[in-house]
Image: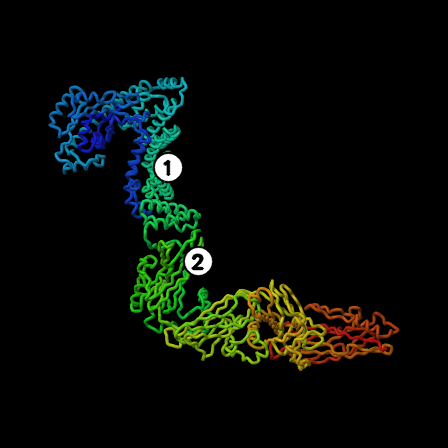
Amino acid sequence: MVLTTPLAEAACRKSGLSVVDMLSPFSLFKKIDVPVRTASDQPYRLQMFKIRMVYASDVRKQDYEVADQRIKPVVSEANESALPDLLSDPPQLEDVLSKPEAELCPLWIKKFNRALMRTLSFSEHETFDHPVACLLVVSSKDNEPISKFVDLFNTNQLPSLLNEGIMDPQILKHYLILHDQQDGPQEIAMNILAEMKSTLGLNDCKLLCINSSTEADGADAENSWLPYKSHGLHNQDGACWLNTDDLNEIKDFMQDLASNHIIPYMEQKIRVLNQQVATTRKGFRNQIKNLWWRKRDDVPEAANGPMYTFTSIESQIRVLGDYAFMLRDYELALSNYRLLSTDYKLDKAWKRFAGVQEMSGLCYFMLDQSRKDAEYCLDSAFSTYLRIGSSGKRNATRCGIWWAEMLKTRGQYREASSVYYRVSNEEPSLHSAVLLEQAACCYVLSKPPMLRKYGFHLVLAGNSYYISDQKQHAVRAYRNALFVYKQHPWSYINDHVHFNVGRWYGVLGIFDVAIKHLLEVIACSHQSLTTQSMFLNDFFHFVQSMGKKFDVYKLQLPVINMPSLRVIYEDHRTYASDADVNVSESIWQELEEEMIPSSSIVRTNWLEKSPDLRKYKDSCVCVVGEAVKVRIELRNPLQIPVVVSCISLICQLSTSLDASSAVNSVLTTGAGEDIANTKPAISTFEDDGNNFTVSKLDIVLGGSETKSVQLEVTPKVEGILKLHGIRWTLSDLLVGYQYFEFDTKRKTKKGKKGPRRTLSNTLIVIKGLPKLTGCIDHLPTNAFAGDLRLLKLNLRNQSEYAVKNIKMKLSHPRFVIPGDLSEVDFEFPQCLRKHVQSEISTVSTKRTQGDAKGLLFTFSQDIKIQEGATFSWPIWFHAATPGNFSLYISLYYEMESPSEITYRTLRMHYNIEVFPSLNVSFAIRMCSSRLKEYIVRMDILNRTPSESFILHQLSCNDSKWAISSLPLCDSIRSIETVSANQSVSCFFKIKDLGTNSCKEAENSSCRSDMLFLSREGNSNTEEFDVSQSPITNFHYQERYQQGRLAKGPRDLLDFILISKAVGGNYSKSDPDVQLLSHHVCHCSAIDQSPIWWFMEGPRTVTHDFSKSYCEANIQLVIHNTVQHNISARVVTYDSVPDKSQTVNLQDSNSNQGGWYDVSLENDIKAISTAKGTHYQKQPSESISPFVWCSLSSAQVDLKPDTSTKVPLKVCIFMPGTYNLSNYQLQWKVHSSEVGQVDENQRSGGGQGHPFYVTVLQDA
């Protein structure tokens, strides 16, 4: 404790210091080396000692609010000094891990900890801050210095704590006379000193001379400052009159004060107190007595317990323990603290109990005896302080800081961080922020480093700094945590850190860094709409605050989808539309394989013609005047619509004059270089209107919307064109740009150390070439199965040169075939009529060539498309089968003028969806009563939900077949319309007109086409010719396709059904008549066999049975239908007639195919009743009514396509109707030179066909 007179303070103020400031730098003794003997007889040497000097006016209880205001400048001063560091790059992981503890925690944090502990000075429950000695300082200029010394230590001048009995006023007194050398000679001060020694004591008085320097701020004075600036000797006024001799004298004075006065006084005090404690408290008897005395009355519980004066034994024990601790006799201190802890616990003086527990923990730590006991004591003290309430929180903070420092000294950083975190919860936001930052540093110092906890606690500290209005510290804490979350997919944490750092930078006026951090969060698709709006508004606010537009590399709004990047250019391959580019190149190559000249005739690469261009063979090629298109997707990650304008390509074109240098500098890069990593400045790629033009696009991206944009660059001159990237303007505030990331392919060359990279964003621009554009007009995107249309292919030559040798390859000739030039102006469907088709020449077969890969069509050699001309060619379309189909068409043409490219191709692609319409099927059975005649059932099912179809015409593919209706049945002609979801069946008969046995061949009414009746009941007059193009060509394709799937016996004939669509949505969409042709190929008879047979003979016989039995002569006609010799055998047999024989309603196999033979039983009975007479005697039921009377079996040999007749005779014994089918026909087919015989048809047999004969009784 220091007491001074005003003149003494004035003498020190000449050098800008107070008395305490002048003496304090010399109060720390690191090597004092003083022998000390406390309670034991064994002395030890004290190596380090410190004296804390304070004015008597400052010895008082601290007000926490006032004390906190003194702490705040410590943080604020560091806050201002941290601003320059915020402009540097944030620390990285390697930098943080390599830093020692002293660099991780700034020095000002230790200063803050000391200031925070100093707020607890002069507390009444501990004696560390109780004055040990009193230094009275009087100036030599004072009148009557001796009286001044007496007045200074007057009771009224002492602190209230000494007068109230809390502190012991009987302390060591030391008297100092301060002489200013500028006030006069030193002899005056010496006389005063001599008088002081005689009055106040010989050893307690000292003389100190100051201000010996002759010039303020001299060289000697400046040098004298240096050793003590680190101890707090700071000149506030800028002038200093202290020289080296003065400083040395001050140092010697303080050394003498500590070693010869204070330390001996404390030793003496310890020995006296220890004797008193030993007499009153130590020993078994004293302990029992003390325990009984403390328990006789109930002590009320209070925060501070009962009032203890400095004369109480508890206070004396506390002074003994604290003095022993300060003189580093930790065992003596610990024994007294343990003695006190029991007393305070019994007295329920919890604050004092926590204080001695706190000191016990520190003693255990300094003795390094028991780590568990040390941690237990500190934990108990910490918990007890918190239990007291608000009065103990700051003490808990001090206890926690000491506890954490103890753990850090032992290397227990993880446990220390937990203590810091516990302490931070009890302090205001500013103090909490500093403590949390210390906890974060402990986590990174742990083994292994706990980086996530480090970042988390830094974020907590930064938030507390911001609440305390310490923005620089908040930014610093958040910046230091950036590297932790940079490599982790913690989106919300990253957004929080970057947004707050950016916002706080903006508040500090550092807009460029603020925008840099906000750029990391503007593409926060995972955030809510409100959060996205807040991020974007703050970002735009700081951008506007910059007052200018600037370029941002890899701006994430919108997000550029690099995998969707597609460069579209046309070399010898051109495309009719942008959609055609999406088709796989392998499909086009397979389609064009036979159309493009082979490599054996033409050079492998058309670039090989020019030796100068061989070095470009790994690059892409485009043509002057033809746009290079770049297709890429832009995605808005936000739920907020954004305006993106001026979207364009970043390009660079090197003209042909410097193309050689461009090859070395642009196309090829050394090992380790990459265009995506060099990041050239966008200003180097400004638009060059003389060499190329780029398109600009403006779009509005809705919330979470993705749009595919197509950008174009059109070169104007030859050279090397390089596509670097894309640029755009966001909300008319800032320009974003991003460089393309192309895949690179490596090629290793001999003699080269590094790989050679060919970048796919480089294109060679060659001079202009002829180019055809074209399309098929009115090609439907959807149609009904069977839809037949006449379309037109239009080609236009947009160049200045003519093209020749045009070829066309079609991928699906089943759907599309080329027509003839004469069909261009035809009207459809009138051109398909027979009288019109007879005048049309068919397509020359020399110009078409079909295979499994498509149809190759070669145009006439004299066809050339001149510059600027348009050329049209008819195209026939037929929707063959339901489904989704991709139609590929490639046109090949050559240049009439010489050029680097000898040919080009035009590729067209169409997607067609074919809906089901009519399902048509046929079932055929051989006629049992006629040779070469078949009964046919046609089943039609309308599979559309709303369309109706009119049946127009049914035709056979071969003119040798004739279609006719069944006798007395015209059902096939009566069917006109098949409604939606309706199924119909009809029957008709077909005849083979090519056989001699068919007499109708000469009848002109037997035709291979049959027209259905119109609504008025008349036949249609429009008969379409199915034997001419295009129907016959499409039918050929259908035969090929259906033949691949056909199974069973060999085909007999094909059917073509022509219908028209009426009603529904389909016909309304197109006013033209929709004609549909349905082709059913490879139809065969259900019961097809190598031979054909039937009975010939009378159907009705009249006989008088009263005279004799009736004999009927019949013939069995047998025909060989195969190209092999056949042996046939006829076997007849007799059987007893029964009802089923006499009247056979239907054959056992007659239901196959859906029809049956009609019995004539009822008709015959009616005739028999009318015309016949009753015979007198009925034969027995066991006697057969008829028998075969010729040979029982006969064998014949048949040559191919020949017939024979086997005569038969039957005897009938009574009138009636009889089925003469009780015979069998067996055959065997013999092999011949024509071919092998099918094993299934080599041999066989069959039951006789029904043949009814009616015998009437002659009247």
- Image location (x, y in percent) of residue 118: 30, 31
- Image location (x, y in percent) of residue 986: 67, 69
Which dot marks residue 707? 2
Q: Is residue 212 above or below residue 993?
A: above
User: Distance from label 1 to label 2 (Cα)?
Assistant: 50 Å
Type of amino acid at the residue the image marks with label 1? Tyr
> Of label 1 and label 2, which has the lower sequence position?
1
Residues at marks 1 and 2 touching, judged by CB atoms closer than 8 Å: no
Which element carries disc 2, helix, strand or loop?
strand
543 horizontally vs 908: left or right: left
839 horizontally vs 1240: left or right: left
Using the rendered image of the protein, determine whether residue 94 is visible from the camera's viewpoint: no
Which dot marks residue 492? none
Res 1065 → quadrant: bottom right
Using the rendered image of the protein, determine whether residue 769 is visible from the camera's viewpoint: yes
- Image location (x, y in percent) of residue 1144: 76, 70
Q: Residues within 10 Å of mark 1 (few under 14, many from 20)?
A: many
Res 237 → quadrant: top left
Q: Number of callouts in the render?
A: 2
155 horizontally vs 563: left or right: left
Quadrant of the drawing holding the N terminus: top left
Q: Which residue is mark 1?
A: 421
- Labels 1, 2: front one: 2
Type of amino acid at the residue the image marks with label 2? Lys
Name the residue at 12% across, 25% down.
Answer: 188
Quadrant of the drawing holding the C terminus: bottom right
Residue at the right extreme, as displayed: 1176
- Image location (x, y in percent) of residue 1105: 85, 77
Which element carries disc 1, helix, strand or loop?
helix
In front of the other: 1187 or 993: 993
Q: Is residue 1138 above or below residue 194?
A: below
